[in-house]
Amino acid sequence: MQALDGTDLRVVAALQVNGRATWDRIGRVLNESTRNVARRATRLMETGVLSIISLVDDRRMGSAVLRLRCRPGSAVGVGTALAELPQTRFVSLFSGSVDCAAELSASDEVLTDLLFQDVPTIDGVVESVTYPALRYFKSPHEWHLDVLTPQEAEGLREPWTPLPERLGRAGETPSAEEERIIAAVSAGGRATHAEIAAVAGISESTARRRLDSLIRRGVLHIRAEIEPCYLGLPVEAALWLRVAEREVETVGHALAGLAPARYVVAVAGDHQIVAQVAVAGRFELYEFLREIGGLPGIRAIETSMMLLPLKRGFMIKKNGRSDRWAGPIG
């Protein structure tokens, strides 16, 4: 998959900062014509390279990282079956001691059924280990390609964009009306207010006000979903870290502050932190591991190379492109 060129990268980066920014606003900030911005973004979305999705921070939901070993020759089938579950946010095949890994998002009751009834019955699963998420230091919707100036990024942000320190805290439970709004933007984060109003059964002005409130309160995150390989970062890895308990907070924040880190979460289990990183090459990954290896409190790092992403942000992936939404609706 060929990396995007400079202008496309800047348009994608703008949508990472604000997935609902108008084409006119992005054009003014990037000093590009509205027509050029709209043409490029629409082409990327129509071909499945780029998707604008929405993710809910819902306190009723629990999260867990799942790693599996599979019978030889069955990993693709296992991963495909996991990707079809609406509770899996992310699924990928890996090298090393992990054949397949996933992130689950569901209520504790549903998680229990998934982990003890559904997952073990998938043909090919030999062993599964679950790491309940305790505290998120960084989520993919925070990760932005570093091609915009600070002034450009600021020009795209809304004045009420949720601050990073809110991440990891319990979110708010959406109302029934808000659930309908969330359903309207689940797979299409750029749905118009008129489209949202039609789905939710409310006026367009109410749809605008309620959607803005959901985003302002940090209940809903509008996210630009794109494979890192299109951004010139084709090498991805999952890191399973053993960390001294007293240093978990320090290490988590340190990792989250590094550009290659897309995802950092403290978990319960025989590892204390799980992270995902994206870099330009294997040498860059080697240098990154050398850099973090010196952080106080890290006792061991197990590295699994990502081979085939099957699902990200609840979107099924095929050949590096978004195929369809396979997550919760509302």
Image: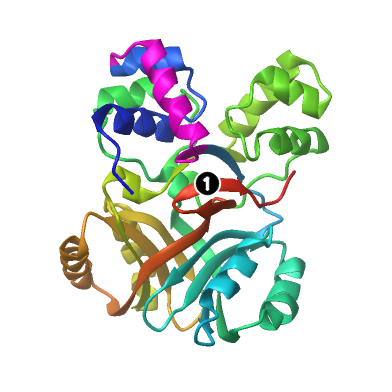
Q: Main secondary structure of the magenta part?
A: helix
Which residue is painted at 16% across and 70% down in the image? 290
Magenta stretch: includes residue 38: yes
Instruction: Give the position of the C terminus as an image quadrant.
Output: top right
**Is 196 or 69 nearer to us in this picture?**
69
According to the picture, the residue beneath numbered tag 1 turns out to be 322
Magenta stretch: includes residue 53: no
Residue 169 in sight = no
Above or below, 311 relative to 160: below
Q: At numbered mark 1, what does the secondary structure look like: helix, strand or loop?
A: strand
Colouring convention used in this rendered image of the protein: rainbow
Q: Is residue 87 left or right of residue 20?
A: right
Q: Is residue 247 left or right of residue 173?
A: left
Which residue is painted at 80% across and 28% down in the image? 200
x, y percentage for residue 18? 45, 29
x, y percentage for residue 219? 62, 40
x, y percentage for residue 189? 59, 33
Rendering quarter of residue 77: bottom right
Rendering quarter of residue 286: bottom left
Which residue is painted at 54% across and 50% down in the image? 313
x, y percentage for residue 83? 61, 62
Rendering quarter of residue 12: top left
Magenta stretch bounds: 31-51
